[in-house]
Image: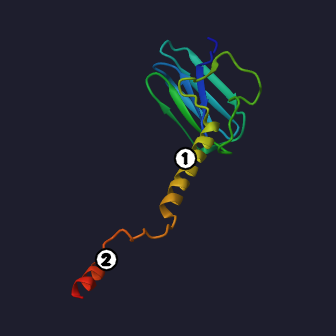
Amino acid sequence: MARQHARTLWYDRPKYVFMEFCVEDSTDVQVLIEDHRIVFSCRNADGVELYNEIEFYAKVNSKDSQDKRSGRSITCFVRKWKEKVAWPRLTKEDIKPVWLSVDFDNWRDWEGDEEVELAQVEHYAELLKKVSTKRPPPAMDDLDDDSDSADTTST
C-alpha cells in the first residue's frame, strides 16, 4: 500500500512556527525535527501510512522544538533560529504542496504588532512624563491670612 501525505496546517509567530498534522486516531506516530527539516509519519485509523517531509524555509532550533499529540492531530512547535523574522511560507522551495495549507484560524499578522506595541509604549511614556513633570507650587494667595486679621484687631 502506498504512503499518503497527512493534511497539514501551519502558521507563523515571532518565535515559533506551528504545524498541525491532521490525522484522527493516529498510531505509530514518529516526529523527527532537525535544524532544516521535519519528518512526520504515522498510521491513521484505517491503517494507512501517512508520511510528510518538509524542508523548512529557514533554519530552526530543533533542540527547543516539540510536538504534542491529541486524538485529532499532532501539533509541532518549531522554534525559529532567527526570532521576529516572518516566514512567507513554510517550505524551502517556493512550491505549495496540495496537502499543505495556512491555518487561517490561528494566523495573525504579527509583524504589525510591533507598531501597536511601540504606540502603547509611547503612550505610557507620555503618561509618565505628565505625572513626573515638575510644576510650580500652587498659588496660595486665595487663602486667608490669620496673622493679618489678628494684627488689625489688636490696634
- Above or below — where is 20 with respect to 131? above
Q: Nearer the viewer, residue 24 or 82?
A: 82
Q: Residue at x 62, y 18 (%)?
A: 5
Q: Which of the 4 image quadrants contains residue 146? A: bottom left
Amino acid type, mark 2: Asp
Residue 79 is at least partly visible in this image = no
Instruction: Residue at the far bottom: name it.
Output: 155
Neighbourhood count class around disc 2 (C-alpha, 10 Å): few under 14, some 14–19, many 20 upward = few
- Above or below — where is 73 with respect to 34? above
Q: Nearer the viewer, residue 88 or 1?
A: 88
Residue 21: x and y, percent? 56, 24
Disc number lying in front (2 or 1): 2
**Disc 1 target residue:** 120
Residue 80: x and y, percent? 64, 42
**Mark 2, secondary structure of its residue:** loop
Image quadrant where one finds the C terminus: bottom left
